[in-house]
Image: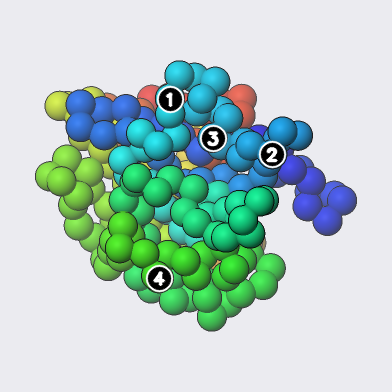
Amino acid sequence: MQQRSGGSLLVEIQPFLVITAHDYILFDTGLGLRNPNGVLQIHQHLIDNGVNPMDITKVLMSHLHKDHSGGVSAVDPISGQRSLTFPQATYYVNRHEMEYAIAQDGKSYHAEDLAILQQMDNVIFTEGDGTIDDYISYEMSGGHCPYHQVFVVDDEGDKVFYGGDEAPQVSYMIRRFVAKYDFDGKRSMELRQQYMQRGKSEGWTFLYYHDTKLPFGKF
């Protein structure tokens, strides 16, 4: 997906679907755009690849910046009612990131898309580090934004790492630099080096949300 923001910035994104022995896992939900037929783009991409959007069982949110969470919910063009875009799934969202997003509504966060998360039974709010169903681990990383989190899925030894905007492109992993747009640029830089080393030793497949040239790979 691509979108120009403010007429100048080209945003390239790609939510990921990982299918395990237990789940259909979606990592982040994209911009929430619709195609000319009115179908959500993220739904259409799934359908085009043989996946019913209603089959998604888990939605793992790294953080709630609008380029990652615009597809969390949508307004039905006929009824005008807002609902979660993956109603059969359990959403996992950091509790403090949720609170921060509502309080910081504006440039990076769109509270109108997110408020529904606080009202639904199929949303689990995480805190700190932990595990989901004994095979998915999450860690609060806090580099790109204060309550950012990352995930490792260990599906019978096949490990997938999703770092959201802590590890958005492979070039960010290789180059040592402090990004001005990160909440804590130095921490983000250090985390990328740590993740790369851990990934090398444990054989992780990295998923890069903002890298359309090399969307995934190993070190």
Q: Residue furthest right?
A: 7
Q: Amino acid at mark 4?
A: Gln
Q: Are marks 3 and 2 in contact (CB under 8 Å)?
A: no
Gap between marks 2 and 4 measured at Cα: 26 Å
Q: Which mark is residue 100?
A: none
Q: Categorize mark 4 by other alpha carbons within 10 Å: few (<14), some (14-19), many (20+).
A: some
Residue 61 position within the rendered picture, expressed as x and y whole percent measured from the top left: 41, 52
> Which one is earlier in the sequence, the residue at label 3 or at label 2?
2
Query: Quick check: can you spot residue 75?
Result: yes
**What element does badge 2 sit on?**
loop
Gap between marks 3 and 2 measured at Cα: 11 Å
| Disc 2: which residue | 38
| Disc 4: which residue | 118
Q: Residue furthest front?
A: 79
Q: Is residue 28 left or right of residue 57?
A: right
Q: Amino acid at mark 2?
A: Gly
The residue mark sitting in front, 2 or 4, is 2
**What element does badge 4 sit on?**
helix
Q: Which mark is residue 43?
A: 3
Give the quarter of the image for residue 148: bottom left
Residue 159 position within the rendered picture, expressed as x and y whole percent measured from the top left: 26, 31
**What element does badge 3 sit on?**
helix
Q: Are marks 1 and 3 in contact (CB under 8 Å)?
A: no
Q: How many marks?
A: 4
Give the quarter of the image for residue 79: bottom right
Most foreground residue, 20 or 63: 20
Q: Amino acid at mark 1?
A: Val
What residue is shown at x 40% (from left), y 70% (from top)? 118
